[in-house]
Image (cartoon, rainbow, N blue to C red):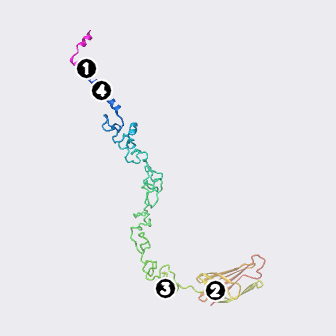
Amino acid sequence: MHAIEGLNHVTPLNDSLFLLSALTVGLLVGACGSDQNITDNAQCDGVLNSTEVTVDDLFDSDGDGYFDAENEQCQETYSAEQLDCADEDPQVHPGMAEVGCNEVDDDCDPSTPDEGDSDGDGVDVCAGDCDDNNAGISPELDEILCDGLDNDCDASTEDAGDVDGDGFTACDDCDDENFDANPGTPEVQCNGFDDDCNELTPDGDDVDGDGMNHCFDCDDGDPLRFPGNTEICEDGIDQDCDEIDADCPADWNGVWDTNDVYLSCAMEYVVIDFNQVLVSNTGTDISFQSIASAQPGTMSGTLMGQDFTVNLVIAGACEEAFSLTGSFTGDDSFSATLTATFTDPLGIGFCYDCVSQSWSLTGTR
């Protein structure tokens, strides 16, 4: 009975609290019903409905104007150019420029590579190709000197060095071991050196046009006198600039009278009998031929200055070897030694009574 009586005695304050609680519960129930309605009504359909501020904005999380490519409704509603492959990143969507080597598909186009190899050298820009438009440049290549390219993509590898430190690399310096030779140095005449690395800049003048500049030409006013020119003997002119007018070589050609030379042996198979020789001389070649005697015949050899040596070998069962060694003692005289050597190669006595011997020979003409 007391409990019932208590109910019959509700105070105004209790009434107010009861009404406030009932109102709060009602509002919460109403709010939950509204959220569920948004969820139920949100569709990626290209139509503005009561839950959206702009068309399908609930399906454009990053607000970049492109819609969630993973949502099936968006896939049906919008073209590929309107679908966002990363709807949480406003910097990624169709139409964005692809940024290389960031491992992100910035333009939502898988066909646009993040790593390119435009020059087909097997190394893409992400792997360090510093010029992907030139197959001759990549980190896997060796540096090629003096081509003006960073072939190996390594700035520390020089395209060319400067050994002499004159400010010019070996590509432009004609002598990279000489500080005083480079394209920036003025040409110094008569030092026999290409100071400015320009072969067109003369080391000296060539007034007479004989190909020798004045620094080395003994007479730059005479084109017939310069170092290296052929000297004409005994003409009073120094054609080769050696300060000597060379003597003409003696002409030993002709018939020379000699003292008598006689030898007969081997039952007259060997007969030497002459008192004249014919001398033939061309440069350093010279020969002596006995006249009126088949033996020793023509002996040939060399002439060195005034001295000569000539020889002749006649092979056979009795080998005959002749030599004449001597010197011209004047324009019309010589002295020499004639030697005849006999050898029996078979050792059966074919030389008979021939004995090797020598004669002093003098000649005049």
- Quick one: label 2 or label 1, which is nearer the N terminus? 1
- Evaluate if marks 3 and 4 touch, with contact meaning CB atoms under 8 Å apart: no
> In which quadrant of the rendered view does residue 15 lie?
top left
Which residue: 30% across, 25% down? 29
Which residue: 39% across, 37% down? 73
Q: Of helix, strand and loop, which one carries label 3?
A: loop
Residue 115: give x, y in percent of width and height: 43, 48
Q: CA distance from mark 1 to mark 4?
A: 19 Å
Q: Of helix, strand and loop, which one carries label 4?
A: helix
Q: Can residue 12 be seen?
A: yes
Give yes or no for residue 99 being in the magenta stretch: no
Q: Residue furthest left?
A: 12
Residue 140: give x, y in percent of width and height: 47, 53
Q: CA distance from mark 4 to mark 2?
A: 146 Å
Give the residue number, with chain letter if any, for mark 3.
237
Give the residue number, with chain letter if any, for mark 1.
18
Give the residue number, with chain letter if any, for mark 2.
279
Q: CA distance from mark 2 to mark 3?
A: 31 Å
Label 3 sits on what residue type? Ile
